[in-house]
């Protein structure tokens, strides 16, 4: 039992990626203020289900995130740090879906600080994470759920090779009203092309 627990802790700390401009690592409690800063911005949270009203909300969010990667039915949260300054500029969530598909399907979500948008950072981070999901973890399918008015997010997904699979009309009760939900997906064989 002890050896198994130890392996999981080591696995958590090894889940770090480096790209040309970013360090990507698991979320930590010391990230709470930076996350609160951009996730409490009205222009940013209009597309987010998690809207913190105080830093304590972010602390609770961090504690709820899985500490282990690739556990069915959990969300694992990464943060994006600029190389050099180590400024936290965004986050990426990976949801290991609780399905009967042998943990072969995941959902992604992403948020970027408005000051760092339109510089390719989200594309860079998602490319690294998605590549790991498909090549190392042998996932079959990655999905993303998007508000159809979030044009920049849709463009990002299309640039990454995602296809629009469904448009559900007024299927989510979100921020006090019924809204549409668009689902994009990417299969492993589409990623390798």
Image: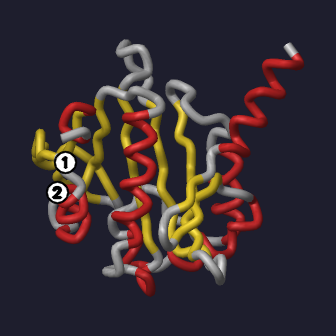
Q: Secondary structure at mark 2?
A: helix
The residue sitting at 57% across, 76% down in the picture is 82
Task: Determine contact: label 2, label 1, CB under 8 Å.
Answer: yes
Q: Is residue 160 left or right of residue 40?
A: left
Residue at position x 32%, y 59% from top?
A: 176
| Residue receiving disc 1 | 162
- Rendered location of residue 69, percent (x, y): 60, 35
Q: Is residue 36 among what the camera can see? A: no
Q: Residue at the far bottom: name it.
A: 115
Q: Which mark is residue 24?
A: none
Q: In front here: 20 or 94?
A: 20
- The residue that disc 2 covers is 158
Which picture quadrant has residue 6? top right
Q: From this view, report whether residue 123 is shown above or below residue 140.
A: below
Q: Quadrant of residue 105?
A: top left
Residue 144 seen anywhere in this rendered image of the structure: yes
Tell me the SS state at disc 1: loop
């Amino acid at each position: 039992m002890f050896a198994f627990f130890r392996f999981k802790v080591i696995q958590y700390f090894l889940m770090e990626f480096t790209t040309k401009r970013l360090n990507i690592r698991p979320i930590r409690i010391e990230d709470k203020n930076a996350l609160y800063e951009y996730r409490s911005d009205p222009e940013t949270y209009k597309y987010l289900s998690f809207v913190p009203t105080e830093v304590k909300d972010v602390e609770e969010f961090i504690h709820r995130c899985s500490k282990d990667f690739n556990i069915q039915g959990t969300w694992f949260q990464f943060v994006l740090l600029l190389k050099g300054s180590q400024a936290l500029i965004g986050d990426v969530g990976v949801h290991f879906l609780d399905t009967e598909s042998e943990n072969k399907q995941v959902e992604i979500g992403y948020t970027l600080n408005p000051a760092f948008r339109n510089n390719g950072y989200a594309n860079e981070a998602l490319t690294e994470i998605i590549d790991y999901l498909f090549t190392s973890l042998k996932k079959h399918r990655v999905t993303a759920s998007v508000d159809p008015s979030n044009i920049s997010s849709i463009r990002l997904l299309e640039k990454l090779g995602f296809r629009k699979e469904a448009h559900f009309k007024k299927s989510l009760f979100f921020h006090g009203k019924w809204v549409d939900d668009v689902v994009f997906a990417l299969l492993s064989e589409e990623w390798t092309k």
